[in-house]
Image (spheres, rainbow, N blue to C red):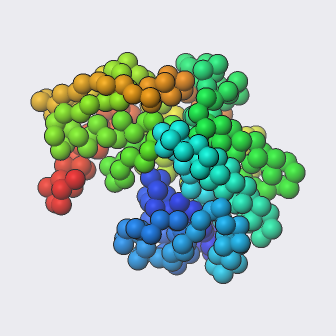
Amino acid sequence: MKNKEQILVTGAAGQIGSELTPLLRKKYGESRVIASDIKTDIPSELKDSGPFEKLDVLSAGRLGEIIAKHKITLIFHMSAILSATGEKNPQLAWKVNTEGTRNILEASREHSIKKIFVPSSIAVFGPSSPRESTPQETILGPNTIYGITKVAGELLCGYYVSRFKTDVRGCRYPGIISHKTLPGGGTTDYAVAIFYEAVRKKKYTCFVNKETMLPMMYMPDCLKATCDLMDADFDNLKHHADFNVAGMSFTVHELAREIQRHIPEFTIDYKPDYRQKIADSWPRTIDDSAARKEWGWKPEYDLSSMTEDMLKELQKRKEKSGL
């Protein structure tokens, strides 16, 4: 990407968007990155650091107005209803995740947008998918509405690439762990909440069992993967909006044990709820060799380095202003 690009981020106040937007503004200029979200309670550091537009991605007309007004050339479409929230309101999840994506793709076609990032998720896999070293290309069959919408999104993006030559790219994100953003309604939220509770109360009750293992990624690696893929040469890409990306995989017990290396008095107990069934349908480990080969993906953090950094940053926040 070049500095002359005009960039729109949808879902800019969400888990990933709230950290991606400042990164893009730092890299390409504050005035060139337009944050947008349906929410009204936007953090001041996001709303005041550059242009902001209120946007419901279900409004194709409003989306077109913003693209035309700001002469948008690149879009990072981060708006979504996540897995756990989606199971509580599947109708809304379907509308936001599929119709919102279709609106983005159609507006991009109409306005000749150069590149669009549309994230997917490991939720596209289901009970019939291999759970160990899940391949790039395999049976999907998700059993959550979130996963179903992400499969539909991948197929729709693929259609726009082949039918309209639209440059659409995306990663199948694993669980994302951040010290800046609170959990956002996903099944992997436990891997974020456990750190906050370890620093605040030195104890945590987990909603999945101790042997639950899922692919995870630290936010700096998530942002790196997103930007690296958008910077990649399109001619080198055989896949587009469905890249497996992995950072690390660990059980809840392994994560708790790593935290205890830094906070020996930390304790954890387990009360699995409806999210256990969702977690049990997802991969334990991911094969991301296609991403490594096609655009050079390589994570920088493992469980040990992530845990050390998470606890350090959260402790600083607690001492400064509380959590």
Q: Nearer the viewer, residue 303 or 193?
A: 193
Q: Nearer the viewer, residue 103 or 257?
A: 103
Q: Nearer the viewer, residue 143 or 2?
A: 143
Q: Please give the name of the residue rendered at 24% of the width and 49% of the height, measured from the top-left corner.
A: 314
The quadrant holding residue 270 is top left
Q: Is residue 79 left or right of residue 111?
A: left
The quadrant holding residue 71 is bottom right
Q: Is residue 106 left or right of residue 200?
A: right
Percent x, y of residue 154: 71, 42
Q: Please give the name of the residue rendered at 45% of the width and 30% of the height, measured from the top-left corner.
A: 275
Q: Please give the name of the residue rendered at 54% of the width and 49% of the height, measured from the top-left corner.
A: 81
Q: Nearer the viewer, residue 28 or 82?
A: 82
Percent x, y of residue 53: 54, 74
Percent x, y of residue 259: 23, 32
Quarter that holds the N terminus: bottom right
Q: Residue furthest left?
A: 265
Image vertical order of residue 132 relative to residue 166, above or below: above
Image vertical order of residue 252 relative to residue 64, above or below: above
Percent x, y of residue 219: 42, 47
Q: Please give the name of the residue rendered at 41% of the width and 68% of the height, measured from the top-left corner.
A: 42
Let me know if residue 228 appears in the view. no
